Amino acid sequence: MSRVTQTKVRPAGGLAPLEGRGHRVAARTRSGQWAAWAFLAPVAVYLLVFYAYPLYRNVELSLRNYTVRSFVQGDAPFTGFANYVKIFGDATFGPALWHTVVFTVVSLAFQFGIGLALAVFFSRNFRLSATLRALFLVPWLLPLIVSASTWSWMLNSDSGVINVVLGAFGIDPVNWLTSPDWSLWSVTIANIWIGIPFNLVVLYSGLQGISPAIYEAAALDGAGGWQRFWKVTFPLLRPVSAITLLLGLVYTLKVFDLIWIMTKGGPSGSSTTFATWSYRLGFGNLVPSFGPGAAVGNLLIVMALIFGLIYIRVQRRQAHT
Amino acid sequence: MRYWKTAIGLVLTGVMLFPVYWMINVSFTRETDMRKSPPSWFPVNGTLEGYRAVLDQQLPYLGASLVVGLGTVALTLLVSAPAAYSLAKLRPRGGGVLSFVLLIAQMIPGIIMAMGFYAIFLSTGVLNTIPGLIVADSTLAVPFAVLIFTAFMSGIPEELLQAARTDGAGTFRTFWSIVLPVSRNSIITVSLFAFLWAWSDFVFASTLDQGGDHQPITLGIYHYIGNNNQQWNAIMATAVIASVPATILLIIAQRYVAAGVTAGAVKD
């Protein structure tokens, strides 16, 4: 997802490379190739028109000096990397980069930690465990706008339930969404909540893959529960953990809806990430600056693709071993 | 001892789902109690005025979302099922490259696609139209759909297809009468997810349909928050209704997601 944005589980991503080993070698006849490509043609055309072309337009946007008028007429002057120079020199660049890093790292650390703890907990099958595990999926399936607006109201300074609960412990009300000190933490908390189910599901299935015999052997050798976790579960889970974290990283980098709906990147830019900055440049102002917006977007794409390629590499390697 | 764990599990689930409960609770809260301190923990003096407001104001948005969702499902299936059949069974030259491109395509942030689409839609005149939004939303689902279908169709026994060929069925006939019916469960899985993602989409809706006559429910909620931020029961009531497809998915897909991922469903 998107959604998690878009932290959305893509189970097939983990499966597809595994397939194909079972293929029987069929003769690649000429007519067979025609038929094969006739079936592939729709998706090939689709990828060219609805993926490649928008991405090309985006690169083109970032290399020209577009105004609203030239956007419609299409005669914007070519300015090379001027838009990129402009965003690197922009006062928003440093903070946006920092916020993106903090948001991503803190989200991932907590999503993964809590997800792993819950996965271990749920792997001791107890009464109702399957049902409760299914219920944990709810935050992940809800439309982001629903989660974001619910959290907005819960974090409301005056009437929000979070401040009421904190007040019961004698903590003064916090201006979660309206104070520059707290806005980034607020959206991070909401994002952690949304990402926990994904981590839980993937790590749980990873735990299922560990043979109970190994635990029995460890128990016979006198390993306690805590030791069993750190010496057996954690190392054996490392491949699945790598996949979970990398995929989570790619999806957290693109989170936009949540932040935009809760804080619009504010107040005064205190929760602006690359994704919301790009949107604000392109769509958020009365006078759009498409060029710089597209340039920020392309930086984001490069970041996502670097980690995406690492993910695919790690996954391929695991599929082959 | 075993009930201990169930008790802890119930508490954890309760904490996790508290925001969902709170959304439902607020949706029934009276306007006058909204800023009461402390808030009512249960909707004791519940009201339906929030839901009445939804019926009055949000039905067109819900209708648009339904059309967009169904359109996205149709387009996604149309493009991805034949491609997956080819990748899984027909061994096209260059198929590996295409699978790789699809894997990469999933990772492109939606906001970047939105900007490219905006430029294209503006010049072709499909900006602020439902078909334009359907096309954009389908990009969320097509790579996922091809990968799921390919994984599933690879599990269809070669003997089954061979038998069809022996009976004189061509490639298309085999696809239409054998492969598609056998893949029913994965079709349901893909459809449910494609619908849910289109239904939940905010990025494309807010960039490509901001000035449209027919706007989806995500924009309905967004305008609500922007315009009358006093009427939180109506906002939360809309949110509750917007969550219905997700709930249905959770109940039905429990079975079909598992069925789609484990390719053992060939039996039926």
Image (spheres, coloured by chain):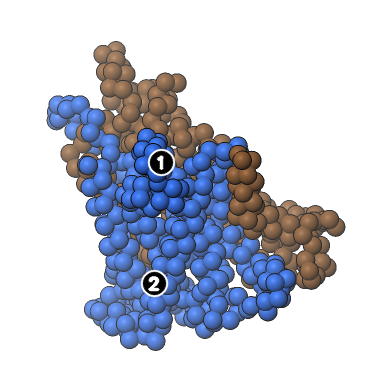
Label 1 – label 2 distance at C-alpha: 41 Å
Quadrant where the N terminus of chain B sits is: top right
The residue carrying pointer 2 sits among few (fewer than 14), some (14 to 19) or many (20 or more) residues within 10 Å by Cα, namely some
Q: Quadrant of residue A41?
A: top left
Quarter where residue B80 is shown: top left
User: Which residue is denoted by mark 2 in the rendering?
Assistant: A101
- The front one of A57 and B268 is B268
What amino acid does circle 2 point to? Answer: Val
Q: Nearer the viewer, residue A309 or B141?
A: A309
Residue nearer the viewer, B153 or B92: B153
- The quadrant the C terminus of chain B occupies is top left
Chain A palette colour: blue
Query: Quarter of the image holding residue B212?
Result: bottom right
Residue A298 against residue B137 in the figure, above or below: below
Label 1 is placed on what type of residue? Ala
Residue B53: image location, x then y, percent: 75, 58
Q: Position of residue A69 (x, y in %)?
A: 40, 78
Q: Chain of mark 2?
A: A
Chain letter for the residue marked with disc 1 in the picture = A
- Disc number for residue A219: 1
Residue at image location 64% in from the left, 58% down from the top: B19
Q: Name which of mark 1 and mark 2 comes first in the sequence.
A: 2
